[in-house]
Image (cartoon, rainbow, N blue to C red):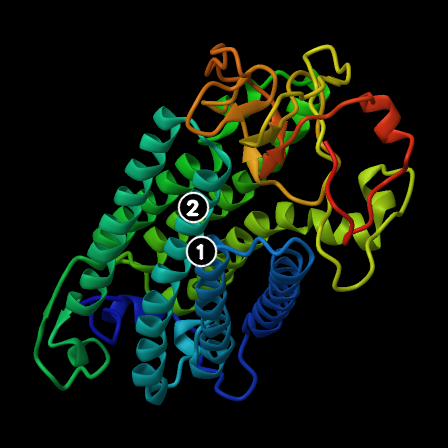
Amino acid sequence: MSDRGTLPPPEVLASWPKPNYINPENQTAQLMAVEITLCSFTTIVMALRLYSRGVLTKSIGTDDWLMTGALIFAIGLTIVNCLAPQWGWGVHLYDFKPEWIVPARKLAVATEVLFTPCVALTKLSILLFYHRVFSSRRFRYFIYGGAAYIISYTISAIIVVFLQAIPLRAYWDKSIPGRFIDGQLAFVIYGALNCLSDLYVFFLPIREVWTIQLPKKQRISLVLVFALGSIVCIAGIIRIYYLWIVFSPTNWDFTYQGGPLYIVTAIEGDLGILCASLPALKPFIHRYAPGLLGSSSGRSRPTGASPSYRLESYDVDRRRDTRRITGTGAHSYKMTSIVTGPTILDNESEENILPMQGVGNNGWDRMGGSSDGHGNGGSEGRNGIGKKVEIEVTVENISNGTVEDLEKQGPLSPRSPRRI
């Protein structure tokens, strides 16, 4: 594929059958079926992700936009790969028409240009998602290091693509003299670096999730969600194998092996987006198919309504904390509702995976002061998964009533004053 030339040696030519330019053996059907099906399904899942984040939970972030960019490159990659069989990829070299050389090699360069940023944006999006949900400073250092690693080898790979032939046009136009790199070595090294980043990104959060104070069954489920990326890692390893075969200077049927290489390239690109987007569909499933999540009820909000949460505090024994707030005058407080111990809030988001720092044991932080009014706020972090909700309230003197009395009045309407 690099500077091997366009014709095999005479002994290889003598072993070939007569060319079949009319109905040659090819892999067009397999390639088109995998490419179109996988890209279509990935696009649908990505659209549902944006709907879940942008409409249902109104929590769309930078990670979603990076993943959208990855999808754009993935769609372009699918289009290029579907054009490849028309120009000889997936056909035996002895059935390869000479006029296919130029468009076939141009398509190969286009595939390399589209695939590299596609997988890079996917993994950067996943790291940004980790940054959103994990608050541990030590863990975030691993996120920054992984992002720097991905950006570095991605830039290097793009440079190699454009410098694999000097001038680049000599890669497809053999009438132009040029200098060529060792394509087999360069692209196998890139494939290995890319595969290592797959393993790093998809398995990075497992230790953090496993240490959370949750029932073992729930921890295993969370680990399996993050480990969905192992499928992508397997696709990356298979891709390295085909890169080695296709770019081998002694392989004179590289056009036929190019078919599986195009297929596994699409699988790696699309599956990365797919696996990373599936966990974000929980709000969509919760609303429209709650039975899939084991929910006993299908409650949902009216269309256009904002998410609502009941602001409560729980201790590690899952008992309700009904501390009453009293005082004189007006004071400004910040309230944080968290779940600690083996409890998960039943909401439609995945905002925070603890431990969190700076939250007092009673769930209240006095703004600019102690958290409980007695100087004993504390900042001990807690392990768990929960929705962190912060509001500012003005606490006036509450008299002649208890929390239970207030609760008997029923839920508040969206327009009524808030009660503590």
Q: Does 387 sit left or right of 149 as displayed?
A: right
What amino acid is at disc 2?
Leu
Residues at circles 1 and 2 in contact by the CB criterion of under 8 Å: yes
Residue closer to the observer: 238 or 151:
151
Q: Position of residue 142 (x, y in %)?
A: 34, 31
In the rendered image, the residue lying farthest to the front is 329
Identify the residue position indicated by label 2 in the image. 128
Mark earlier in primary sequence (1, 2): 1
Q: Position of residue 358 (x, y in %)?
A: 45, 23
Mark 1 residue element: helix
Residue closer to the observer: 189 or 137:
137
Residue closer to the observer: 8 or 331:
331
Using the image, determine if residue 161 lies above or below residue 63. Answer: below
Q: Does 189 sit left or right of 379 as displayed?
A: left
Q: Residue at x 20, y 84 (%)?
A: 173
Q: Residue at x 86, y 38 (%)?
A: 295
Q: Residues within 10 Å of mark 2 (few under 14, many from 20)?
A: many
Residue closer to the observer: 197 or 36:
197
